[in-house]
Amino acid sequence: MKYIECGIGNTWLVRTETELEDGKEYEQKGVVGPIKLKSLYIRIWIGYIVLVLDSKEGFKRMRKERKGFKVVLGVVGE
């Protein structure tokens, strides 16, 4: 899976995170393609709480073990 995100709180303003089948993941600066669109999302992370509004999976609320602050728009694809 590939996650392309644009917003504040990540290493770069625009980044691509790639998850491999063995569970490993890595980040790259900018948009790395090609990508087959699966869904769009907005993620807001304030403190330990993460709110995600995803076009495919709907609304999710999660709790993380570390504090953070992020506001990103993202694309999920293959």
Image (cartoon, rainbow, N blue to C red):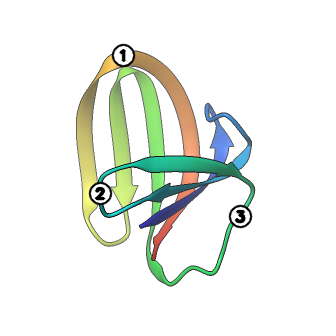
77, above or below 48, in the image: below
Please state which of residues 52 and 28 is positioned toward the viewer in this rendering.
28
Q: Closer to the N terminus: mark 1 or mark 3?
A: 3
- Residue type at mark 3? Val
Relative image position of residue 21 (x, y in whole percent): 31, 64
Q: Residues within 10 Å of mark 3 (few under 14, many from 20)?
A: some
| Marks 2 and 1 in Cβ contact (< 8 Å) | no
Q: Locate residue 51: give its quadrant.
A: top left
Between the residue at mark 2 and the residue at mark 1, the CA separation in whole angstroms equals: 24 Å
Residue 53 relative to residue 16: left or right? left
Q: Closer to the N terminus: mark 2 or mark 1?
A: 2
User: For numbered disc 2, what is the local secondary structure?
Assistant: loop
Q: Which residue is mark 3?
A: 31
- Residue type at mark 1? Arg
- Image quarter hosting the C terminus: bottom left
Between the residue at mark 2 and the residue at mark 3, the CA separation in whole angstroms equals: 22 Å
Per the rendering, the mark at residue 57 is none
| Marks 2 and 3 in Cβ contact (< 8 Å) | no
Q: Which residue is mark 1?
A: 66
Q: Closer to the N terminus: mark 2 or mark 3?
A: 2
User: For numbered disc 1, what is the local secondary structure?
Assistant: strand
Question: Which residue is pictured at 37% across the width and 55% down the height?
Answer: 53
- Residue type at mark 2? Asp
**Residue furthest to the front:** 22
Relative image position of residue 69 (x, y in whole percent): 52, 24
Q: Which residue is mark 2?
A: 22
Question: Which residue is pictured at 66% across the width and 44% down the height?
Answer: 7
Residue 2 relative to residue 57: left or right? right
Question: Which residue is pictured at 67% across the width and 51% down the height?
Answer: 28
Q: Residues within 10 Å of mark 2 (few under 14, many from 20)?
A: few
